[in-house]
Image (cartoon, grey):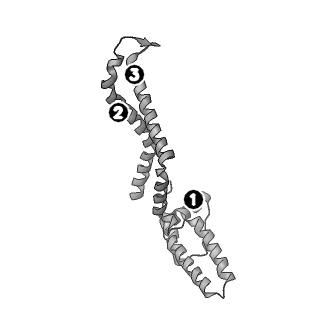
Amino acid sequence: MKKAFMRQYWRIQQSQTLISMVFWITTLTLLMWPYVSWRFTNKNDIIGISTTYWGLLSIAFAVLIGVLLLGWTYDVVLGLWREHLTVVQERNPFTTYKINAPVGLILSQTNTILRKTSEDNPEILRHCDFIDRWLEWNADQEIWARTMSSWKEIIGEEDPYLFHLSEKARERLEEAAKEIQDF
């Protein structure tokens, strides 16, 4: 339910920029019009268009330029988006504790090689055990189930074998992948 809601919210955000620009222009133009309309009350036309429309268009254009100028100032002069990206990165679970399945496969292969080349080093084996536990935990996450479902449905792979997981974890992942609804 939460994911379906967030998908709709994301779709709304995609059009928000253009729609909000139209609303800014329309609202501010109509708010300013009563204060400047007396300048355009003569009955002259310019290129066959009433001066009223020229006045409205000039206000709308000024608002558009003003909003774009504010955006440019925010981006180039203030650079606040950099701090925003830092906060977004800090809140992203895939930069802190989660691993997506393709990266997990590469990590598991590297971990296996490290384990085999350092069989006599207990510290490295301890590290490898940690990586195995971390990968096992990640295999229970929804993104791994989505990946497994995609491997089966989109790529057509019948049995993506994940050698680094225990039999129990593979079974849980298989069951979770069957329940995933791909879009």
- Front of the two marks 1 and 3: 3
Q: Amino acid at mark 2?
A: Thr
Seen in the picture, residue 170 relative to 125 is either above or below; the reply is above
Q: Residue 134: tell me if it is visible.
A: yes
* Disc number for residue 34: none
Q: CA distance from mark 1 to mark 3?
A: 58 Å
Q: Residue furthest left?
A: 34
Seen in the picture, residue 30 relative to 112 is either above or below; the reply is above
| Label 2 Cα crowd, 10 Å radius (few <14 / some 14-19 / many 20+) | some
Q: Amino acid at mark 1?
A: Glu
Asked which secondary structure carries label 2, the reply is helix
> Nearer the N terminus, badge 2 or badge 3?
2
The residue wearing badge 3 is: 55
| Label 3 Cα crowd, 10 Å radius (few <14 / some 14-19 / many 20+) | some
Residue 42 is drawn in which quadrant?
A: top left
- Front of the two marks 2 and 3: 3
Q: Which residue is depicted at the point 35% across and 33% down?
A: 27
The residue wearing badge 2 is: 27
> Nearer the N terminus, badge 2 or badge 1?
2
Asked which secondary structure carries label 1, the reply is helix
Q: Is 37 in front, or is 133?
A: 37
Q: Which residue is depicted at the point 58% across and 62% down?
A: 152
Give the x, y percent position of residue 37.
Answer: 33, 21
Residue 131 is drawn in which quadrant?
A: bottom right
Q: Which residue is depicted at the point 49% across and 50% down?
A: 79
The residue wearing badge 1 is: 153
Give the x, y percent position of residue 128.
Answer: 59, 80
Q: Amino acid at mark 3?
A: Gly
Q: Which residue is depicted at the point 61% across and 59% down?
A: 155
Q: Residue furthest top?
A: 43
Give the x, y percent position of residue 183.
Answer: 50, 53
Q: Residue 166: tell me if it is visible.
A: no
